[in-house]
Amino acid sequence: MTIDVSPLFSPFKVNGLELQNRFVMSPMTRTRSPKGVPTAEVAAYYRRRAQGGTGLIITEGTVIDRPLSRNNPSIPDIHGAGLSGWSSVVADVHDAGGRIWSQLWHVGALPDPRAPADWPAQFESPSGLSSPEQPIGLEMTDSDIADTIASFARAAADAVAVGFDGIELHGAHGYLLDQFFWSQTNRRGDRWGGATLAERSRFAVEIVRAVRRAVPSSFPVGLRISQYKIQDYACELVSSLKEMEDWLGPLADAGVDVFHCSQREFAAPAFAGADANLAGIARRATGKPTITVGSVGLEPNFYQSGDTGSVTLSELVRRFEQGEFDLVSVGRAILADPAFVEKVRSGDFEAIRPFARELIGGELV
C-alpha cells in the first residue's frame, strides 16, 4: 500500500520555534535518573531519537521543586542537580539536529507501583484524594498552592537557562493539574474549586500565567490534556464544543501556545457525537495549534486487534490534511525504533522495528 506521507514532513512554527516536521516524541516516564539526575544513558536515549528524524522531543515528566511533586525516586528533577544532567541531554539533542522540550510535572496524589516498597512517598492533591472516595495524602492549603505555582514558574525559567526549546505542562492522566480539573478529586469550596470545569481550571490558568512571566515571549509553552485518567479510563471532562471552549479558552488566553491532546486512540471522537478527535475539537475551541496522540504507529493497533499499521498511518494523514491537528505525537513506535520518523519519511515501512510489550535488548531503554 502506497501512502503519501509528505504532508507530515512540512515545517511548522510553534511560537518562536521552527520544527522540521510534524512528528513529536511523546513524553514517556522511564525512572532511569537515580536521585533525580539524568545520566549519560538518558542523553544517549534522547539523542538517538533526534538522529532518527523526530521533529520535536518532549521529555519524560520532570518534577518541579515542590517537596511532594514526585512518586518515584528515579524520575528526573528539573531543579538542583538534575539541571546539569538535562544540560547534557539538551546539548546531545541539539548536536544531533533535534529540538527538545521539558515536560514539567507534579504527580499529585497518584502513586507509582514501580517505586521501591521502602520509599517513603507522600502525596498532596486538591482535596487529599487520588480518585473518588480514595483518600491519599494531604489537601493542599492556599500556601501550598501558591508555592506550587511559583515552583512551576521557577522550573520553566530553569528550562530556559538549561537550553530547552520549550516546555510542556502535564495537565493530563489524573496527575495534579488534572486532579484540579476533575470534580471527583477537586471538592474544594474555595476559589480553587467550583461546580464548573472553568472554575476548577483556575489553578492551571495561574500556573500558565506565572510560567509565561518567567520565560521569553517567544518561548513555546504547551499543555497536555486528556479526557481519561489513569484512575478512570471512561472519564469525560467535556461532552461538547462549548464545554471545551469554557475549559481551554482561559488557558489559551493565559498563554498556552499548543495543546497536546492525549487519547488512547487518535481516531476516536473526542466525545459521543463529536465529528473530530480531541485535538480537533481543542483546535476548533481555541484557535491554537494542537498535537494529536494515541496508538500512532505502523504496528498492529495496541488497543484493538485487526487494524494494520498502514491503515492507521493513512488515516493519520487524511485527518492531518483536513486540518484536524497540526502535530503528531508518537510514543511506543518511537520507543521501539529510534529511527521511526526517518523510516516513515523514506517509505521504508518494512524496516520499522515493531513494538513489543517486553523490552527488546537495550534499544527500548
Image (tube, rainbow, N blue to C red):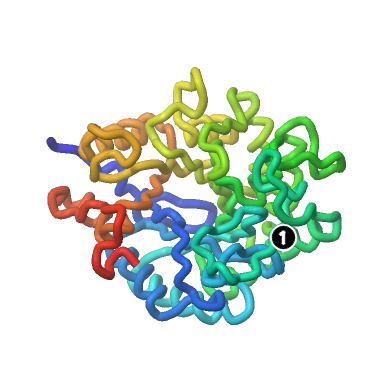
SS at mark 1 in the image: helix
Task: Estimate the x, y position of residue 303 in percent, counting from the top left.
Answer: 35, 38
Residue 165 placement, left or right of 344 = right
Which of 365/311 is in front?
365
Task: Classify residue 169 by image quadrant.
Answer: bottom right
Q: Would residue 41 appear left or right of 247 to someone viewing this image?
A: left
The answer to whether 308 is drawn above or below residue 174 in the figure is above
Residue beneath disc 1: 213
Closer-to-camera residue (26/130): 130
Tally of marks = 1
Which image quarter: residue 310?
top left
Residue at the (56%, 56%) spot, across then down? 168
Local crowd at mark 1 within 10 Å, few (<14), some, or many (≥20)?
Answer: some
Residue 319, above or below 167? above
In the picture, measured across the screen, residue 199 lies left or right of residue 189, that is left
Work out which quarter of the rendered image holds the C terminus and state it.
bottom left
Q: Position of residue 5 (x, y in %)?
A: 24, 42
Identify which residue is drawn at 56% across, 38% down. Answer: 232
Residue 156 in view, yes or no: no
Position of residue 89 measured from the top left corner of the image (x, y, whole percent): 44, 74
Query: Whole-percent x and y of residue 30?
Result: 44, 64
The amino acid marked with disc number 1 is Arg
Above or below, 109 relative to 64: above
Q: Which of the 4 image quarters holds residue 318? A: top left
